[in-house]
Image (cartoon, helix red, strand yellow):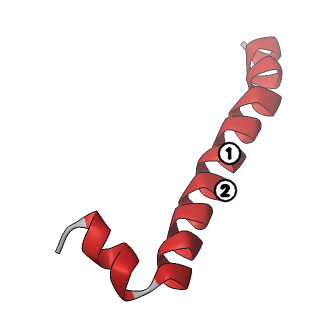
Amino acid sequence: MGLKDYFKINHQRAFLVLFLITLTQAATTVYTYLTSSQLNALS
């Protein structure tokens, strides 16, 4: 089963999964950006 087949079977679930993956990566990036200066100050 490829990505195209997954989109054909269930559009809403596929977009929800892609949205959640993108949201998780964005949250990780923001967390790293916010904590990097604090970690540098400690070291």
Question: How many numbered discs?
Answer: 2
For label 2, count other residues whose C-alpha is less than 10 Å away and answer few (under 14), some (14-19) or many (20+). few
| Label placed on residue 26 | 1
- Does residue 15 lie above or below 42 as drawn? below
Q: Are marks 2 and 1 in contact (CB under 8 Å)?
A: yes
Query: Could you tell me which secondary element the residue under label 1 belongs to?
Result: helix
The one of 43 and 30 positioned closer to us in this rendering: 30
Counting from the top left corner in percent of width and height, residue 33 is at 75, 28
Three-letter amino acid code at the position of disc 1: Ala
- Does residue 22 lie above or below 1 as drawn? above
- Does residue 23 lie above or below 7 as drawn? above
Which quadrant: the C terminus? top right
| Residue in view at x 26 percent, y 75 percent | 5
Query: Is residue 18 found left or right of 10 in the rendered image?
Result: right
User: Hey, which quadrant is residue 29 in on the image?
Assistant: top right
* Alpha carbons under labels 2 and 1: distance apart: 5 Å
Query: Could you tell me which secondary element the residue under label 2 belongs to?
Result: helix
User: Hey, which quadrant is residue 31 in on the image?
Assistant: top right
For label 1, count other residues whose C-alpha is less than 10 Å away and answer few (under 14), some (14-19) or many (20+). few
| Residue in view at x 81 percent, y 18 percent | 37
The one of 19 and 11 positioned closer to us in this rendering: 11
The one of 4 and 1 positioned closer to us in this rendering: 4
Counting from the top left corner in percent of width and height, residue 32 is at 69, 33
Which quadrant: the N terminus? bottom left
Q: Residue furthest left?
A: 1
Location of mark 2 (residue)? 23
| Label placed on residue 10 | none
Three-letter amino acid code at the position of disc 2: Leu
| Residue in view at x 82 percent, y 13 percent | 41
Counting from the top left corner in percent of width and height, residue 17 is at 51, 71
Query: Is residue 17 found left or right of 10 in the rendered image?
Result: right
